[in-house]
Image: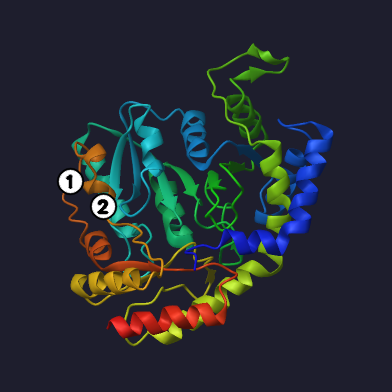
Amino acid sequence: MQFIDLKTQYMTLKSEIDSKIHEVLDAGTYIGGAWVKELEKQLAEFVGRKHCITCANGTDALQIAYMYYGVGKGDAVFCTDITFVSSTETSKMFGATSVFCDIQPNTYNICPVSLEKQINAVIKEGKLTPKAVVAVDILGNPCDYDKIKEICDKYNLVLIEDAAQSFGASYKGKKCCSFGDIATTSFFPAKPLGCYGDGGAIFVDDDEAAAIIRSICVHGKGPRGKYDNVRVGVNSRLDTLQAAILLPKLKALADYEVDNRQKIAKRYNEAFKEHFTVPFVDKDCVSVYAQYALLAKTNEIRNSVVEHLTNKNIPNMIYYPCPQHALPVFKDEPHFDEKFENANDYCARTLSLPFHPYLTEEEQQIIIDAVLEAL
């Protein structure tokens, strides 16, 4: 049994994926080309944005977003306390300060009340300039974008959607990656839409922004090509082979994988709702359940379930074992008066079970029985 079964997905899509790979090999085009252009077109259409610019990975996508907006020393970047380090690691590289916010107790996404509180604390202290908010769609569940955008507009902050875990999800009828001034995603293999290596993408609606971001991705190239360098950039491009692999996987995601994820989550929810806090998804939203995370009633129960599953060779993970504010890399970042009560509680009680759109009912029943047995 696999935590995320990429082998079964490949076997299901093998003919389409192999055909695309051989097209690239036969053409001998490994950087750029028709496959990358077609993928960018389809990705933009899927999420409802004017421009998609692919890049080497999701972390680069965030770094390039920070570069485009000139985030740097003296700037405060606000982010949820429950995420992966790359959400603000890439702004800290340029000298910015990470200001973490507590999470909502139901969705585990950034709490708008905590966000506004932290913004006002930064303003009151007067040492940093509030610059950007990174809204992370944690576990594949969309943030409350209406409230977050309202706060960003109020304080004139850049809104960056970190949709690394939520490609295919939607908020009030709009796909994730369509929110904020700019959105980024990751095609790491285990993501809801993953390639067979690293990959990422950036989404914007503004023509000039798209042109500058494309320039940044290729060493700051100018209108006359890669030797006409007009700005400081990076080397971050999606390989043609990865683009070819993603094309059939994108179709599968749209055609049936998102629906399959809903069915599997519903079955888990029915089995566990009396014993755990199961994932909450707002009625106007669709989650892609990048991870299916339960909250046990206590830390001790969580740990005993994890031990039991491990002993039975059933994969399990903890997303995430440590809140960002407690990581050594962020030890010097200001907390102000935020206690991160919800984030700390989440980390103490969460565990994630095997979850992917090809999980069979038989496999799922084995997992359900083992979890309930552990109780």
**Rendered view: 336 above or below 238:** below
Query: Rounded to the nearest whole Å, what is the CA distance between mark 2 and mark 1?
Result: 9 Å
* Residue 30, percent from left and from top: 72, 32
Amino acid type at image mark 1: Phe
Q: Please name the colour scheme applied to the rendered image.
A: rainbow
- In-image side of 119 versus 138 (left or right): left
Q: Which residue is mark 1?
A: 336
Q: Can I make out residue 34 in this image?
A: no
**Nearer to me, 246 or 48:** 246
Q: Which residue is mark 2?
A: 117
Q: Are the two marked residues, 2 and 1, in contact with CB atoms closer than 8 angstroms? A: yes
Amino acid type at image mark 2: Lys
**Nearer to me, 372 or 103:** 372
Question: Residue 209 lies in what quarter of the image?
Answer: top right
Question: Residue 72 lies in what quarter of the image?
Answer: top left
Mark in front: 2 vs 1: 1
Q: Residue at x 69, y 56 (%)?
A: 250
Mark 2, Cα crowd under 10 Å, few <14 / some 14-19 / many 20+, is: some
Q: Earlier in the sequence, mark 2 or mark 1?
A: 2
